[in-house]
Amino acid sequence: DIQMTQSPSTLSASVGDRVTITCRASQSISSWLAWYQQKPGKAPKLLIYKASSLETGVPSRFSGSGSGTEFTLTISSLQPDDFATYYCQQYNSYPLTFGQGTKVEIK
Amino acid sequence: EVQLVESGGGLVQPGRSLRLSCAASGFTFDDYAMHWVRQAPGKGLEWVSGISWNSGSIGYADSVKGRFTISRDNAKNSLYLQMNSLRAEDTALYYCAKDKGKRSGGSCYVYWGQGTLVTVSS
C-alpha cells in the first residue's frame, strides 16, 4: 500500500503569509495526487487535482506542484477563510490513501 | 445539481452488521466510480472502499477488507456499504463521494454527501 506523509502536522501563520505544505508518497504516484481543504463539521473541498490542476472555483492563491513522490500545496497569501485542515490524497492505485492532515492555525 | 444522501448509520454493538446507502441524483450515476470515505471523531480522512462505474473494479482499505462489501445498483442510482463484524474502531462519519473523472477507475472527489454517523459500542 502507498503511504502518504504530510508535513507539518500543524502550522501557525498570519494573514498574508505564504504557506507551504508537503506531502510525500512511499512510492511513485506519478501526478495522481489531490489536495483538499476541510473545515469543522463540513465535508472536504477539492482544491487541486492531478498534482497541479486548480479545481474550478478555487482561488488562484492555491497552487500545487510535484510529481513522483514529493508534492507541495502552496497558499501564496493566506486569507482568513483559509484557516482549516488540509489533506493530500493519492489516487494512483487501490487502496487509495490520504495523508494525516495539516492544520493551519492563526498565529 | 449533484446530490449524495447517505443513510443507514446508527448505534450498533461490536460484532454486529450495518448497511449504509447513498442515494445519488443530478448526474448520470452509471458513468462514475463511487467511494466511501470515513472520518473518526477528531481524526483525519480514511478512504474505505471504491467501486468503478460498472462494478468491474473494487477496492478496500486493509482495515476493512474481508468485513465490508461495497456494491451499487445503477438502476436505482444507489451505492451501498455492507459492514459486518463491526469494531469500535469503525466508529466514524461515513461519507459517500463521487469520482471526478467519468468512467475512471478511481480518482478524487468534487462531490461529497453530508455523511452518516456509525457508532460501534456496547
Image: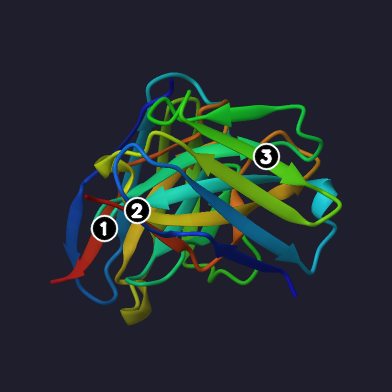
Residue, x 31% and y 63% (percent of image)? A18
Query: Residue A29: x and y, percent?
Result: 53, 26
* Separation (CA) of disc 2 from disc 3: 20 Å
Residue A1 at least partly seen:
yes
- Residue type at tag 2: Ala
Question: If you read the primary sequence from the N terminus, does the residue marked by circle 1 or circle 2 appear first?
Answer: 1
- Residue type at tag 1: Pro
Mark 1 Cα within 10 Å, few/some/many (few <14, many 20+)?
A: few
Q: Are marks 1 and 3 on the same chain?
A: yes
Residue B99 at least partly seen:
no
B71 is higher (above) or lower (below) than A101: above
- Residue type at tag 3: Ser
User: Callout 3: residue from which chain?
Assistant: B
Tell me the tag on residue A36: none
Question: If you read the primary sequence from the N terminus, does the residue marked by circle 2 or circle 3 appear first?
Answer: 3
Question: If you read the primary sequence from the N terminus, does the residue marked by circle 1 or circle 3 appear first?
Answer: 1
Residue where numbered disc 1 is placed: B41
Residue where numbered disc 3 is placed: B71
Looking at the rendered structure, the secondary structure element under dot 2 is strand
Looking at the rendered structure, the secondary structure element under dot 3 is strand
Residue, x 67% and y 37% (percent of image)? B51
B112 is higher (above) or lower (below) than B36: below
Q: Do callouts 1 and 2 mark residues in contact (Cβ within 8 Å)?
A: yes
